[in-house]
Amino acid sequence: MRDMDERGITASVIERLQATPDPRLRRIMTSLVRHLHDFVRDVELTEAEWATAIDFLTRTGQACTGTRQEFILLSDTLGVSILVDALAHRAGSGVTESTVLGPFYVEGAPERANGADISAGLVGEPLFVEASIAGRDGAALAGATVDVWHSDDEGFYDVQRPDRPGPALRARFHSDAAGWVRFWTIQPRSYPVPVDGPAGEMLRATGRHAFRPAHVHFRLAAPGHATLVTHIFVAGDAYLDSDAVFAVKHSLIRDFTEQPPGTAPDGRVLGRPWRRLEAAFVLAEAALGA
Amino acid sequence: MRDMDERGITASVIERLQATPDPRLRRIMTSLVRHLHDFVRDVELTEAEWATAIDFLTRTGQACTGTRQEFILLSDTLGVSILVDALAHRAGSGVTESTVLGPFYVEGAPERANGADISAGLVGEPLFVEASIAGRDGAALAGATVDVWHSDDEGFYDVQRPDRPGPALRARFHSDAAGWVRFWTIQPRSYPVPVDGPAGEMLRATGRHAFRPAHVHFRLAAPGHATLVTHIFVAGDAYLDSDAVFAVKHSLIRDFTEQPPGTAPDGRVLGRPWRRLEAAFVLAEAALGA
């Protein structure tokens, strides 16, 4: 194993990986090295370009914090996240489609009671969300854990607002005995993904816009069922056909219907127009052994 | 651009990249997305494996400091660095072969006069290095900038010793009128690359050893010539055939000859055995326009 030329090096590295005890890791690493080397050979990557890539990846890692995940954003904007999602959720007939998690999910969101208002006083159009959760057999799923998070009226998540002390437009609910979660929030807006880091540099350098169509994130978990990570998109949004992270699915678009001032289904009286979203989620059974 | 399936997503991302103003970047990004997606499809990367990869890459970036470059170490241990090197230095007939830079090069090493001792008092076998620098036409290159750096008697670089206040076994020289650089140091030892970070996790998980054969790094720069980054390896080292970073080239191996106690060529009197290395470096002409 000396005097590696541009072909021999790949075989040598792969040979060295054959002692990997775990067969799945061996397969992944072998394929990774083959494809990574093929890419380097295909473009004849120069030393200066390699150095640029090292610097880019380093800064991507260093841009990550407890509330920002720049590598997920890079994966999202290069279509890797939605590809992994597509591979994981092929046989979804009859269940709600999944889409990307995105970089703004935060562990440990505050638990809120059904019916709560999670807008934390933020300005925006009031939005009443009614979500039902059921299994493929139609049976309501009571006690499902439902995480929701979305952007504010200006397109920012709470974690992008260092001036805000705590969570907003982000909560964990549990479905009631009939399988429903209801809450008040404000209408989400389309927004650019964060462009002040390396992923933003990539978008600018490739002449791409950074916008995502307006949506509400949902993560739904119920015993005996596969956890579902998805969005509900706002019908009519200008970016539905050019989402910066390629995550729109037709089946996930809903009307967030405009309502006149008056009394909402839960008795709240509104002196201004508001919106209403109703969404039915259907979860797959958990895979055997999972 | 909605409802991406596992094939359609790649075409969609590549289509989005076609607005990249710089044609070279467009080519690189197009190839990167194609090969990256092919890898994900080939192994059917799961969501859990994707999350592990995101975490691994994040920690790799965060392990980088001013004196540690974990992404370079990962590139080295996956054979990417030596592949880039091989592509950049194909037509090297008659010139000294290059090899990887490695993660321990530090900008701004101290300038030292020809003949200096750079061992900074570290324990080890004294080593006298005599290096000549010439062009392909055989003409001596005076005033060439020669950076050298290597491991100590226990296999560590100065930057891996937080207890050491400054540079050791690391310096910048300039060749004399006859094209020579001479200096005293200590004999380098084979050593493991740092295994306390993500690259080390990868080596352990793949059952690989982390050792590199003993060597001295050289970086040689002279006006009108291509900068050469290379090592000189110690003949007889146990790891010459299994270098953890795949960087050994036969033409770069030299005897670091054992010498009896006595007087060295520069008049230094040694009361113990010492070693001597003579190496002739030949630099290519700079590419036109470079």
Image: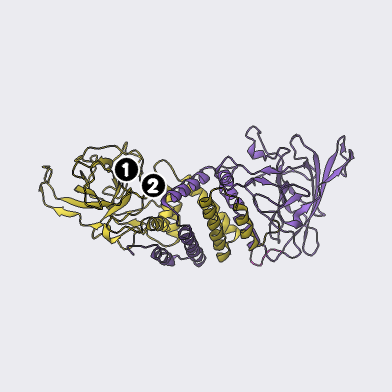
Chain colours: A yellow, B purple
Horizontally, residue B78 falls left or right of residue B11, namely: right
Look at 62% across and 59% down and name the residue there. A11
Asked if residue B287 lies in the magenta stretch, the reply is yes
Q: Where on the picture, by quarter, is residue A234? A: bottom left
Query: Mark 2 belongs to which amino acid?
Result: Gly
Q: Which mark is residue A289?
A: 2
Mark with earlier residue (1, 2): 1
Q: Nearer the viewer, residue B229 or B224?
A: B229
Query: Mark 1 belongs to which amino acid?
Result: Asp
* Outermost residue, right side: B262
Is residue A238 among what the camera can see?
no
The percent position of residue B210, horizontal first and vertical second, equals 64, 45
Horizontally, residue B266 falls left or right of residue A223, namely: right
Tell me the quarter of the image containing the N terminus of chain A: bottom right
Is residue B153 among what the camera can see?
yes
Q: Are marks 1 and 2 in contact (CB under 8 Å)?
A: no
- Range of the magenta residues? B285-290
Q: Which mark is residue A272?
A: none
Local packing at callout 1 (Cα closer than 10 Å; few below 14, some 14-19, many 20+) is many
Q: Are marks 1 and 2 on the same chain?
A: yes
Horizontally, residue A118 falls left or right of residue B254, namely: left
Which type of secondary structure does the marked residue at label 1 adopt? helix
The percent position of residue B14, horizontal first and vertical second, equals 43, 65
* Outermost residue, front side: A288
Q: Is residue A222 above or below residue B23?
A: above
Q: Nearer the viewer, residue A203 or B55?
A: B55
Closer to the camera: disc 1 or disc 2?
2
Look at 43% across and 54% down and name the residue there. A75
Query: What chain is tagged by disc 1?
Result: A
Local packing at callout 2 (Cα closer than 10 Å; few below 14, some 14-19, many 20+) is few
Q: Which mark is residue A158?
A: 1
The percent position of residue A100, horizontal first and vertical second, equals 36, 53
